[in-house]
Image: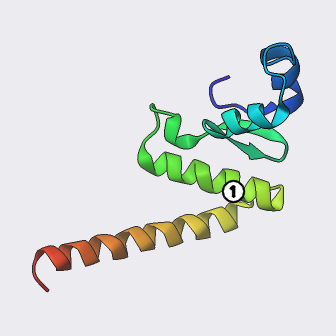
Amino acid sequence: GYGGPTPYRILRDTKYPKHVIKDDQLLLEALSSCAVMVRGNFVLKSALMVDLSDDVKEARDLILFLLQRDGIVLRERLAFALSLTDDLKKSSDGEKEEEQSGG
């Protein structure tokens, strides 16, 4: 599926067998240009998912980070982290408006 997790072993055995790309390090470098590793699975980078809004991409990135770090995503922690990123955006937007107004 589009952006779904794919284990390295599956990619290596089916999409990029040894006779196509011999060097595992080369394959990992190539994959890292378009995907991130989350718990042993490659997942398409959010930035490359053109049908998602920027806010959804940021939320997806946060979810992938929490999955990699903790193995689970707790709704309360996600909501808290998203509120922090929203506060940071508002703060940054306020600073930009202040700079533009000469303040």
Residue at the outermost left position: 101
Residue 78 falls left or right of residue 26? left
Looking at the image, which residue is at 75% across and 44% down?
37
In the rendered image of this protein, does residue 101 appear above or below residue 46? below
Q: Which part of the image, by quadrant, shows the N terminus?
A: top right
Q: Is residue 98 rendered to the left or right of residue 29?
A: left
Residue 99, by quadrant, is bottom left
> Going 78% across and 61% down the picture, which residue do you hit?
69
Q: Secondary structure at mark 1?
A: helix
Q: Where is 29 relative to 97, above or below? A: above
Residue at (43, 73) in percent of width and height: 87
Q: Quadrant of residue 96?
A: bottom left
* Rendering coords of residue 3 (x, y %): 64, 31
Q: How many marks?
A: 1
Viewer-side residue, 18 vs 2? 18
The amino acid on which the numbered mark 1 sits, given as a three-letter code, is Phe
In this rendering, position of residue 74 left or right of residue 94? right
Q: Position of residue 67 (x, y in %)?
A: 76, 54
Percent across and percent down for residue 61 are 60, 51
